[in-house]
Image (cartoon, helix red, strand yellow):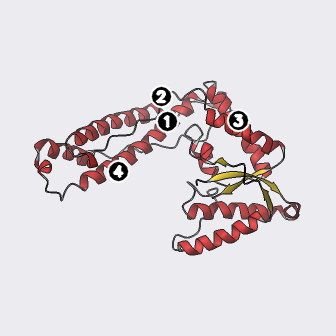
């Protein structure tokens, strides 16, 4: 199974020390990330478990925290939703995707619900155009870097092979082009998401970053296609398509999530991070 949110009511006993509930929820998210179950830790100011701690120790800590957190919540495990509807959805700003991989207490969830809905409404109305352009460039740059890393690893895996196709001039030239590719452009994150459409303005260098990513995408696409034409099927690597220039105006997955979320928020409940 994946990582889900389950509706969670706070028990009366937890209201005696709300600070403890907050601490448990944050530790729960950090440890879940350290175990590899989520895409991001809790907020950046929180310290993740040191890397030298072994997996079994982290798992034992998570189980202890999870048991204590569950004891303070009433969970509806029969009505979950995937965290990825926000946490892995390029529709939302990267900071919001990262923050989604956590347990949300009722007050936090009420704030995030308003934030998510406002963003979705403005975005589907065509707002935040400059920010969305920066976000698309940033997402594309990461996609290019990942695609190029896979292509390079595949090309390196052919170096020691002695098959007849590895001696073909077309293959030798195609592999040389892969090795000669410059690194994928590194572009800055899109910045804080604007709160209102009037706050949405282009940033210095925005168009230049877009053009650099576009040009590199063309180079990578050409190199990958030439390489793939000269190797057996197991070595073929074609680039993934870049994010669309214009996202679909509606996202039924998100809208269904909002419909599911409304009664949770109205009831004054939160969301538990269920691994």
Which residue in the structure is indicated by mark 2? 245
Tag 2 near tag 1, CB within 8 Å: yes
Q: Nearer the viewer, residue 101 or 44?
A: 101
Q: Quick one: quadrant of the N terminus?
A: bottom right
Q: Nearer the viewer, residue 76 or 65?
A: 76
Please report the residue visible at 35 percent of the width from the left and 36 percent of the height from the top.
217
Circle 4/circle 3 CB separation < 8 Å: no
- Looking at the image, residue 266 sits to the left or right of residue 149; the answer is right
Per the image, the residue denoted by label 3 is 117
The tag earlier along the polypeptide, 2 or 1, is 1
User: For mark 1, what is the residue?
Assistant: 136
Element under disc 3: helix
Q: Position of residue 67 (x, y in %)?
A: 72, 68
Q: Give the image location of residue 184, x and y in percent.
A: 36, 44
* Helix, strand or loop status at disc 2: loop
Between marks 2 and 1, how big is the CA–CA gap?
A: 8 Å
Name the spot of residue 68 as percent of width and height, x first: 75, 68
Query: Quick check: can you spot residue 225?
Result: yes
Residues under numbered marks 3 and 2 in contact, where contact means CB atoms less than 8 Å apart? no
């Amino acid at each position: 199974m994946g990582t889900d949110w389950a509706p969670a009511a706070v028990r009366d006993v937890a209201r005696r020390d709300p600070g403890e509930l907050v601490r448990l929820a944050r530790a729960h998210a950090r440890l879940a990330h350290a175990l590899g179950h989520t895409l991001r830790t809790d907020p950046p100011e929180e310290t993740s478990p040191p890397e030298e701690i072994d997996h079994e120790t982290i798992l034992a800590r998570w189980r202890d925290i999870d048991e204590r957190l569950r004891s303070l919540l009433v969970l509806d495990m029969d009505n979950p939703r995937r965290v990825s509807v926000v946490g892995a959805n390029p529709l939302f700003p990267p900071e919001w995707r990262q923050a989604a991989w956590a347990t949300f207490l009722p007050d936090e969830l009420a704030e995030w619900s308003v934030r998510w809905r406002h963003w979705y409404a403005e975005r589907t109305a065509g707002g935040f155009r400059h920010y969305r352009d920066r976000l698309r460039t940033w997402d594309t740059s990461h996609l290019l870097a990942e695609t190029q890393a896979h292509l390079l690893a595949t090309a390196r895996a052919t170096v020691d092979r002695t098959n007849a196709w590895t001696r073909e001039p077309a293959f030798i030239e195609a592999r040389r082009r892969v090795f000669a590719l410059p690194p994928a452009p590194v572009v800055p994150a899109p910045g804080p998401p604007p709160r209102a459409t009037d706050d949405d303005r282009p940033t210095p260098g925005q168009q230049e970053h877009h053009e650099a990513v576009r040009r590199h995408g063309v180079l990578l696409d050409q190199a990958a296609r030439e390489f793939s034409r000269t190797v057996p099927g197991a070595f073929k690597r074609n680039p993934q398509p870049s994010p669309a220039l214009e996202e679909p105006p509606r996202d039924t997955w998100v809208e269904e999530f909002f419909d599911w979320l409304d009664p949770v928020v109205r009831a004054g409940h939160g969301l538990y991070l269920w691994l």
